[in-house]
Amino acid sequence: MEPTVRDVLAFHRVDRAAYEHLVSLGAGRQPARDAVALLMWVHHSVGADAVASVCHEVRTPADAARLVSDALAVLHGVAWPRPHRRQGAGMPLVCGGCGGAVAADARPFLAGLVPGGEPRARRGVAGVLRGVGALVFDDRLQALLRRHEKDGGPVPAELAAPYRPGDADADADEEGGRSLFITFSKGFPLTREEISAYFTEMWGEGCVESVMIERAPPLGEPPRYGRVAFRWASVAEAVLGGQHLVKLLVNGRQLWARKYVPKPHQPPLS
């Protein structure tokens, strides 16, 4: 018998609790989500519960900020601003710093990821976010579950529905959630093929739905901007990592990306 939405939410209570704990300590919702999704992926990859001890070991806002900072370093190879690390606390929190926020048997796997921001970690997190994470981090569904468990009665239809991975954001509006607006360095455009290959390498096969480039730049000038539409809104969100604007390096050329907001009378893309 296939699991229901309620089954999935109940099974992942610990993951949701870790997310809410980080948010309660001042971590932003998206950084907290990405940090927990990373640990969920580690659990799936090596069979070690990488989430269970977060609520016990991450005790202060500084610990929470450090955990999400280290998670971002794994995913993107950059660091969030963080409090100064006290002497002896140089080990990333995701690998066992501050008393060891992550189960010991998961730390060696994570330690191998921390220096590089590996594509497999990014692909893993994107997979979690478009799978069970789409339910785990859905505040509305969580509130519905809590209300049902408190009040009793028949299971709401939305919770009783069969769980089908990818359903939650597969139909998200392209212009409203699944696209990024991209701009190139002046005089250094990228081709559709280069852009598609970059995101495919970073976030996994099939993540890119289409790439569009400025169709009619000023006479004599190369294209200046474009748009990337992903198959899942979770990939676009993961690329941004909670930031308004991110700078990426594609084949030695800089590319800036931000959320795509459709505007009337926008110049055509092709």
Image (cartoon, rainbow, N blue to C red):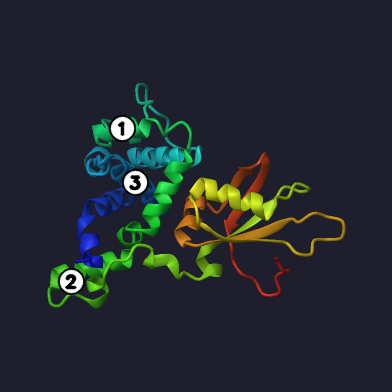
Taking 117 as reference, is 201 above or below it? below
Q: Residue at x 40, y 49 (%)?
A: 125
Taking 48 as reference, is 242 above or below it? below
Q: Report the Cα–Cα distance between label 1 and label 3.
A: 13 Å
Residue 173 image point, x, y percent: 50, 71
Q: Report the Cα–Cα distance between label 2 and label 3.
A: 29 Å
Residue 54 image point, x, y percent: 26, 42
* The quarter of the displayed image where residue 114 is located: top left
Q: Residues within 10 Å of mark 2 (few under 14, many from 20)?
A: some
Q: Residue at x 29, y 67 (%)?
A: 141
Name the amino acid type tagged 2.
Answer: His
Residue 41's disc is: 3
Q: Is residue 105 left or right of residue 244?
A: left
Circle 2 sits on which residue?
Answer: 148
Q: Secondary structure at mark 2?
A: helix
Name the amino acid type tagged 1.
Answer: Arg
Circle 1 sits on which residue?
Answer: 107
Q: Is residue 226 left or right of residue 34?
A: right
Q: Is residue 14 visible?
A: yes
Residue 176's disc is: none
